[in-house]
Image (cartoon, rainbow, N blue to C red):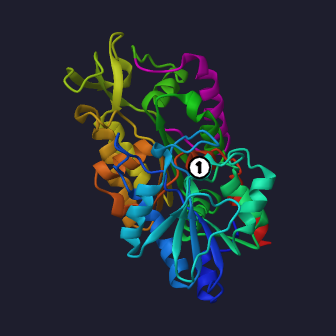
Amino acid sequence: MRVNTLESLAKAGALAGKRVLIRSDLNVPRDENGDITNEARLVASVPAVRMARDAGARVMVVSHLGRPKEGVLTPADSLVKVAARMSELLGSPIRLIEDWVDGGFEVAEGEVVMLQNCRCNVGEKKCNDELARKYGALCDVYVNDAFGTAHRAEGTTYGAAQYAEIACAGPLMAAEIEALTKAVEEAKHPLVAIVGGSKVSTKLTILNNLAQKVDQLIVGGGIANTFLLAAGHKIGKSLAEPDLVDECKKILETLASKGATLPLPTDVVVAKEFSETAEVRCCKVDEVADDEMILDVGPETAAALAEILKKAGTIVWNGPVGVFEMKPFAGGTEVMAKAIAEATAAGAFSIAGGGDTVSAVHKFEIADKVSYISTGGGAFLEFLEGKVLPAIEILEKRAL
């Protein structure tokens, strides 16, 4: 993927005095008082803003927050607390501009302002053309630094890029594009993908797309249970989707046709209740009783998966192999996480993405041992599905 970047413009001295509109992802979680409870997205957005400010640009930061009704701004939807916290992180004051679509406000060189919640603008979500033109007219340079919204063709993620004089990717977006391209399109083999989750149905497109690219496809959770059914194993009362067994068989056929494999569990951790205090046992995969459910892979399987991962050239990780939130069923995912860290240290490129996966990365303390942690949930998944992400597509077109 080839796109213009904010960094290259800054290095060329092309931002001084320019009106720069940065689409950030400041959709941070908040408590009932509207206070920020996790500022990871906010912190990740600061480098682009600082880069433009330090280059002497007139900086406008725009983002959505929550799910407001278009045309209506409530106190709960306001970016006022986000602007205040970003000003602290940035070390300089940030004005919050309320009515900004039609312009009429001034921004000084080296100043940063924040534009009120863009999803309150009528026509934002459907990328209204008139609104998009107004966005484009606000700036000389449009910057998309919000990978988490890259799968949405909205006014501030797609339309503004159409009509701004220059459109480019911010450092966070550029890093995501580089990492995802390196992981899938330009992968160093063996390429191993891990896809975990409760349902095959929610990851079917990802599984089908990755099956055409990978050398090994590791599955976990309810997805693995459905593949076990497809292979003729009994899984007791484990979570599975029997109606998707045929789809699993097709994926296995796709893998086999290109010499790739899907290693199924040979031993599993089971319990009769979905509880951290349930009585737990480890057994061979063919010894699961009718009243038991599979909640993790066993140590033999975990060790086998670890050996596969340690030999990988590229690892794409989306989902755990067990209910890692509960200690009795965390073993498989922990062994796998440590193997990914070891493989990365040995030269493999690893990328992790998705809410549960990022939680596992932090739980098992390997955040600094993975090559890249994706900031985008839905966007990351749609990329793995092989879909074109609109916000990246328009940046590519504008780079030509």
Name the residue tied to disc 1: 379
In the image, the segment drawn in magenta is: 238-263
Q: Is residue 63 left or right of residue 167?
A: left
In the displayed structure, would residue 111 be above or below residue 310? below
| Residue 311 visible in the snapshot | no
Which of 362 and 172 lies nearest the eye of the viewer? Answer: 172
Which of 259 and 333 lies nearest the eye of the viewer? Answer: 333
Name the kind of residue labelled 1 in the image.
Answer: Ala
- Residue that extends furthest to the top in the rendered view of this protein: 290
* Quadrant into which the C terminus falls: bottom right
Q: Quadrant of residue 267?
A: top left
Q: Position of residue 62 (x, y in %)?
A: 57, 60
Q: Is residue 37 left or right of residue 351?
A: left
In the displayed structure, would residue 207 be above or below residue 163? above
Q: Is residue 317 left or right of residue 285?
A: right
Q: Position of residue 168 (x, y in %)?
A: 67, 70
* Quadrant into which the N terminus falls: bottom right
